[in-house]
Image (tube, grey):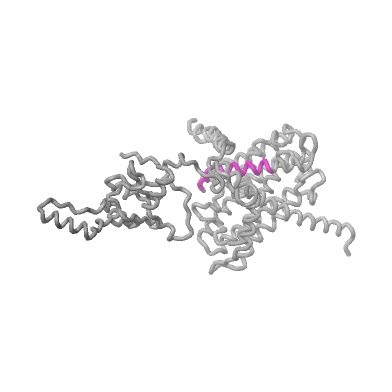
Amino acid sequence: MSAFRQNVIQPIIDLWSLIVGLKVTGKCFSQKLITVHYPRETIEDEDLDTYGGHVELVGKPKDPATPKCISCMMCVTNCPSRCLKVVKAKAPKLTAEQQEALAEAKARGEKVKKPRAPKTPQKFIYDYSLCSLCATCIENCPVHSLRFSHTMYWATTSREELKLDLLARLRRQARRKPRPAAKES
Amino acid sequence: MMNAIDVHMLIRLIIAVVAAMAWVGINALVLVYCERKFAGHIQRRPGPFEVGPHGILQPLADGLKLMGKQLFRPAGADAFLFWLAPMLSLLPVLLLFLPIPYGPMLTAMNVSLGILLILAFSSLNVLALLLAGWSSNNKWGILGAARAVSQSVAYEIPLLLSVLAVTFMTGSFNLSAISTSQGAWPWQWNLMAQPLAFFIYLVSAFGETNRAPFDLAEAESELTAGFHTEYSSMGFGLFFMAEYAYMVVVCSVCTVLFLGGFRGPVADGWWWFLAKTYALLFLMIWVRWTYPRVRFDQLLNINWKWLLPLAVFNLLATAFVMKL
């Protein structure tokens, strides 16, 4: 009897699941669409907070046009795609007058401090065409100067345009609107 | 010497075949659009949207694209059979539309064995699928063809038996006669007298037309495209049109047999026929985007262990009741 029930009655009862399936898709059919018609509609900026676009620099809290970056080269060293290029700033060249003053002070036996190179990099070039968005640079940055941008709608017609000068980009961003620095964790 | 009646019949036939061709083409366009829109909305996306308002010209653009593609035959394929198959798939379709009564007067040819004609010629499609798969010189193709044949042969039997149950009741193979034997209101349709036959017919129809969830002959994830893997351009286009045409035929026959055909409340006419046929077609599309594909052993088990015994039982019960 139980075999009869299992092989004959149960499959007939299970036919109800077909109706349930149709109900599920029927309900979805009548609901509102959840996709966005891209060229006509775009996603609101606040909804893009979780979107990980290309890598960008984070500005100093008090000076958003200057990155927190200390040119330690950790990102460049760790990047598996070699898409970052950082050029350290050089120490400022002393004029002849300053050099003389320095030499004099040294002769007087004073402790001389040569002007040192600023930590902020001179160049920060990023090649998005190579980047795999692995976030290794972001994780390895000791001062949290890198993060994913929220740029979603970016398209170019040539590979060259995918090379970004992140310093210039940061300056532009600071001029436009100071975005709050990402939460430091 | 041809007499006037012969000429009259010939002209009628030519008009009917041309109209059937147009009807097949229009249906293919409309159904492709509906199918993609349905699929989109069920998955909560818009479906085709860019070509024309709400993407309404998308199937037309797709058709033009298909026609513009190169006709390609793989090396080692049997050229004659390879090109014969798509034509053999589509050509019988034109005949299938002739005996279908769209309205009280709107029948191309009032054939007294109409339903037999449809069942006989729709079986040619299986041969076309087999030829296509066989001549492609492709493993997916031959697998798809083998599946199509065993599936169609299996599902044709319960389909025939369920149709036979209805013809037992009306005592006629003439589709017009079957239509008029039913009343205008839903409770006067054969559906009420033969619910089991209707169910069997519907399930077998999915199997016969190779539609999901029984689309094993062209299971994308297993066989890329099954029997039409190697077809490009309109070679594929013809199969595609034939598939949709067979859907329309199957649903039209279902409408005639079980849903009263052109009979309907207020006024009989082609509008009721079209409404019912399209309701069935939409059900087919809905089902396709709801159920997952069955396994091949499941497919055959459903047929041999369920549909066939039920259909035989239903037929015997009908015969018994009719004799009482």
Residue B45 to residue B23: above or below:
above
Please identify the residue farthest to the left as the structure is shown.
A109
Q: Describe residue B7's horizontal placement relative to residue B41 as left or right.
A: right
x, y percentage for residue B123? 65, 53
x, y percentage for residue B312? 63, 41
The part of the image, by quadrant, that contains residue A95 is: bottom left
Quarter occupied by the N terminus of chain B: bottom right
The part of the image, by quadrant, that contains residue B307 is: top right
Q: Residue at x 12, y 51 (%)?
A: A110
Q: Residue at x 62, y 43 (%)?
A: B284
Q: Describe residue A79's horizontal placement relative to residue B251 as left or right.
A: left
Q: Is residue A22 visible?
A: no
Quarter occupied by the C terminus of chain B: top right
Q: Which is more toward the observer, B251 or A14?
A: B251
Q: Describe residue B94's horizontal placement relative to residue A169 as left or right.
A: right
Q: Is residue B291 magenta?
A: yes
Q: Which is more toward the observer, B93 or B146?
A: B93
The part of the image, by quadrant, that contains residue B164 is: top right
Q: Which is more toward the observer, B282 or A133?
A: A133
Q: Is residue B177 magenta?
A: no
Q: Describe residue B238's horizontal placement relative to residue A43 as left or right.
A: right
Count of numbered circles on the image: 0
Query: What is the magenta range?
Result: B278-295
x, y percentage for residue B261? 74, 41
Q: Residue at x 77, y 34 (%)?
A: B265
x, y percentage for residue B4? 89, 59
Please identify the residue farthest to the top as the structure is shown.
A1
Magenta stretch: dominant secondary structure: helix
Q: Is residue B252 visible?
A: yes
